[in-house]
Image: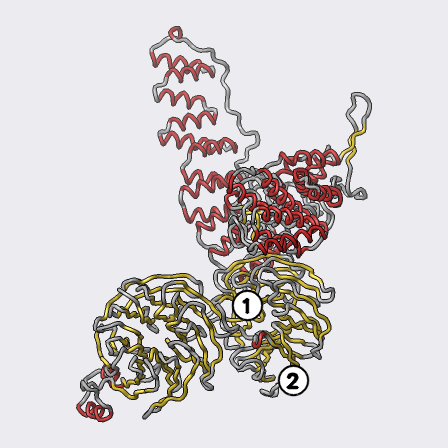
Amino acid sequence: MASSPSMLTKFESKSSRAKGIAFHPKRPWILVSLHSSTIQLWDYRMGTLIDRFEEHDGPVRGIDFHPTQPLFVSGGDDYKIKVWSYQTRRCLFTLNGHLDYVRTVFFHHELPWILSASDDQTIRIWNWQNRSLICTMTGHNHYAMCAQFHPKEDLIVSASLDQSVRVWDISGLRKKHSAPTSMTFEDQMARANQQQADMFGNTDAVVKFVLEGHDRGVNWVSFHPTLPLIVSAGDDRLIKLWRMSETKAWEVDTCRGHFQNASACLFHPHQDLILSVGEDKTVRVWDLNKRTSVQSFKRENDRFWVVAAHPEINLFAAGHDNGVMVFKLERERPASSLYQNTLFYITKDKHVRSYDFTKNAESPSLLSLRKFGNSWVPPRTLSYNPAERAILVTSPVDSGTYELITLPKDAGGAADPTDMKKGSGTSAVFVARNRFAVFSTSTQNIEIKDLSNSMTKSFKAPTGTTDVVFGGTGCLLCLTPSNVVLYDIQQKKQLAELSVTGVKYVSWSNDGMYAALLSKHNVTIVNKQLEQVSTLHETIRIKSATWDDSGVLLYSTLNHIKYTLLNGDNGIVRTLDQTMYLVKVKARSVYCLDRAAKPRVLTIDPTEYRFKLALVKRNYDEMLQIIKTSSLVGQSIISYLQKKGYPEIALQFVQDPQTRFELAIECGNLEVATEMAKQIDKPKIWTRLGSEALVHGNHQIVEMTYQKLRNFDKLSFLYLCTGDEEKLTRMAKIAEHRGDFVSRFQNALYLGDVESRIQMFKEIDLYPLAYLTAKSHGMTEECETILEMTGLTEDQISMPDVGTGLNIPSAIAPTHKANWPTKEAAHSSFEKALLGEVGGPVDETEPNLLEEDMPVVAAQDKNGLAAEDEEEAAEGWDMGDDIGLEAAGNDSDFVNVDNADVPADSTGPGSSEADLWSRNSPLAADHVASGSFETAMQLLNRQVGAVNFAPLKPRFLEVYQASRTFLTASAGVPAIINYVRRNIDETDSRKVLPLIPRDLESLTTIDLQEGYTAMRTNKLENGVTTFKEILHSLLVNVVSSQSQVDDAKALITKAMEYTLAMSIELERRSLSTSGGEDSLKRQLELSAYFTVPKLDVSHRQLALMAAMRLAFTNKQFSSALSFANRVLANGGAAKLVDQAKKTKTQAERSGSTDAIDIEYDQFADFDICAASFTPIYSGSQSVSCPFDGAKYQTQYKGQVCRMCEVCEIGAAASGLRLWVQGL
């Protein structure tokens, strides 16, 4: 499909021939009536089919939405007019009366009327409220093809195959049907004298003008929305323009250009343009003033039948043989450029203006660009140079042109520029104070020019470049359909490349540290080195983005302003009535340009994203301030806080008793939980509170819950445990009062009350037990009494051997007066802030995968691999059950070395230096060195979800053994242990730490090189073993600086990528070569996937060569060509390059097709599942290993990672810690 560069297709549907189209006036809907008798309702913004209506018998030619009611009308070849409700999705009623096909139907803009035109040569007006025919207009002597109401006046225009256009006056009809009473005789006479009756004596609707000029039948006619103009389209291939006055109408001009029948036409609602469509398969746009063709749009195979305009926004739709297309004639994004507090932009009438954000004032026109480019094509981009006060303006006219213009110092009105320099180029942007870059798509060249428009240097753009934008000082971002390239102009070399599809716009943060790459449905945030930080997907089109000063990205879609943090957390800020292009955010104001290029200031509430940002940065004071001063409530923020592991903060937002109770239990706040339990007062709630209170040692609350539940047995046992004899005695009396003999016996047993037990046995006639109890406790008199009561003697009774009676031991230290002494948990940082214990914000950086021990939701590794989706990350194991925590955020029960007020018992007598190591450090490696393997495992489980520790056994033993030396003493005397420290100069016992073998430098210089050698020498089994050992060694290791943390992250990612790549190739080699086509297909897929992991270029070349050979051998010429191109792009050894060139040539000769269709899309952005070795496409659900970042399909969640063989896939984890500042 060929198109003019300025015509933008927004939506296309595939169906049978479209004969009628109607836009909804408010919603993004379009009705399409088809030749197949179906009516379709589409959402053109989302590209989805909402509904189908199928009650007509035969083609449906006319369709229209009601301007205000939830109705639409249709007319078809079954002679019927149907009125439908799109709310109830059914036909409300049918209007019968036409005797032939109904061609068009339209609602009146005010009155309850429907206008229809039919092949029975009549035009009829119906009242849809009382469902009656109110007027029939006759006069055409052939098919009436089209009839429309005037948008404001009481006029109708109609077109017929009798070659005429008629204008009808219906003012009499309006007066007749809107008058509350019947007209007087004088009124009737006045109207009869004023208007001419038709042949049937009808004065309701009379012909005002008959326009004749077409040589063949007229297919369509339309009024101008404001001017007294009419446009018509006919089978004579002409578009005719007519003008009318109160008394006459005449032909103005003819637009010639269609070379087949012209099917339909209309006036542009907002510009002096005419649109027409025809059976010559074209949409044509005409200048209303000059009556000349402006542009045309041609389809290869489809004739056009109908065209429609949206009543409010600049959208059009055209129906053709195979469906419908919704399009714009031009881009509506205003060209603008922001510098500090000033916005420079180009208005719709091509004037350059500025807007001052400090004064909220718009300047007069700085200069006029009316002579720049085409009058109907707006400028595409604007780039501003503050040093020279110059602008670069580009236009898509003539394959791309640009102008360099110096702005006047004073806004002197709409003066044409005097000092300007022109040139050709698709894109032009300033890259330095006196240099700008010009890119041309046709030549794929980037030229660097000075301010005199002279070229200083030139170089080839990266292959496939479609646009260039500013990429930081001295750099350019080159946008291609599948990736973004950061290019250094001075060095003429590529600095970085990121695979992101369809990037159209780039928005830089205020400090230049981050950029947002905007494509149609995705936002990708990168740092200035073009490393991916986070990404998000929207189902609706993304239009623009700008950065808050705090580093939050605000972006606009067609109907929302949304935000995203650097970690990927996002949400909605506000809805939009119309599309806006954001340019700046300042406090609660968002400055933007609308589609009319007018500055707008929108008020927003930044509370939600500022709160989330404060949470990420752990700025608890700001969070507390937001909670106290804002109305930030709702399930979303509560679930967000719970998901992030902050129930104590979520508790501050909640009023609902049930939710408050759940959160209080989760964060251990028994006081609030008790208060809520009293309000709810349900047995299930009291049971949960009792269980939680028992864990906390708060037996007073436990006692209250047991009392509420009337759980007498547990109460008695609780009193026994706490030594409360008084209440235990009372429980015995309660049991006696209740007549519960089992409870009486139990309480008597707890109290050691033998007499009570004997008495109870007597009451229930269990004299043998009573006698035995008395005898065993030496109560002779009681025994005799029992014998008398039973009439037996001692000789008649055989007794078992009875020892001395035992009493239940009593509590040595009664604790019923106070709760059990437990080590009180420290308050979280937020709770301290809530209690006023924290003086200022916590100075912490963004969450870090290897540093911070906090919940990680979307941590990014160096190559941009997202750790996990938010929803997935929240569903793991409970992060607090396995380890007894002193405070939220501590890794184990070690002393706080940063706090001078440490408890006196932190280092007790008999503590070895190994014990100090585990107390002094929160790092797993130090716990392993100290011999505390259990706490090390707990730390690794919490930090990276480690569950399978068998592979770590050699590393644990290596670390443990390397931190000690043993000196043999005399025979029979234990060896003397000498502990090896890594900080040998440290004298403070609270800071001594063990030596950890095979540090980061050793792993990089020795182990990593061994892995490289295995890859190079094709010993892949050895390579997998080596890289997995690197992962295990890094899992139990320490580093000494932030830069080493970054290096460790990079090495973890690299080891994972190489392990994945080698595993894929080993899997391919294990497949049978004689397994048939399925086996061959799988081998080809695995060979292609072998090239996906991010290996070093030299090693990637090996993978590409292997894939290329296998593909070519099996006649996969398209795949082989793709791999060959990648080999050539990477360069390298001459032998490889020559072989790739030969393969490329032969593949191109062979047709560039694949013999077997494999699941590998060379243009798609995807990762490889490390378990199934299948693609995980961008935007689809996945889970990952919290340690090495390996991606998996969602069904593998909960299994052990295949790469590191240690961690649980998809586990909620806080992130590995290898370094603590100050240790």
What residue is pinned by disc 2? 408
Q: Secondary structure at mark 2?
A: loop
Q: Going by the image, does 1041 lie left or right of 485?
A: right
Percent x, y of residue 539: 48, 60
Structure colour scheme:
secondary structure
Q: Going by the image, does 201 lie left or right of 1140?
A: left
Number of numbered callouts drawn: 2
Percent x, y of residue 221: 35, 80
Identify whether 772 is placed above or below 1168.
Answer: above
Depth check: 908 or 1029 in front?
1029
Percent x, y of residue 933: 66, 35
Farthest residue, direction top: 795
Depth check: 759 or 474 in front?
474
Depth check: 1146 or 896 in front?
1146
Q: Residues within 10 Å of mark 1 (few under 14, many from 20)?
A: many
Residue 620 occupies quadrant: bottom right
Residue 42 occupies quadrant: bottom left
N-term-proximal mark, 2 vs 1 = 2
What residue is pinned by disc 1? 544
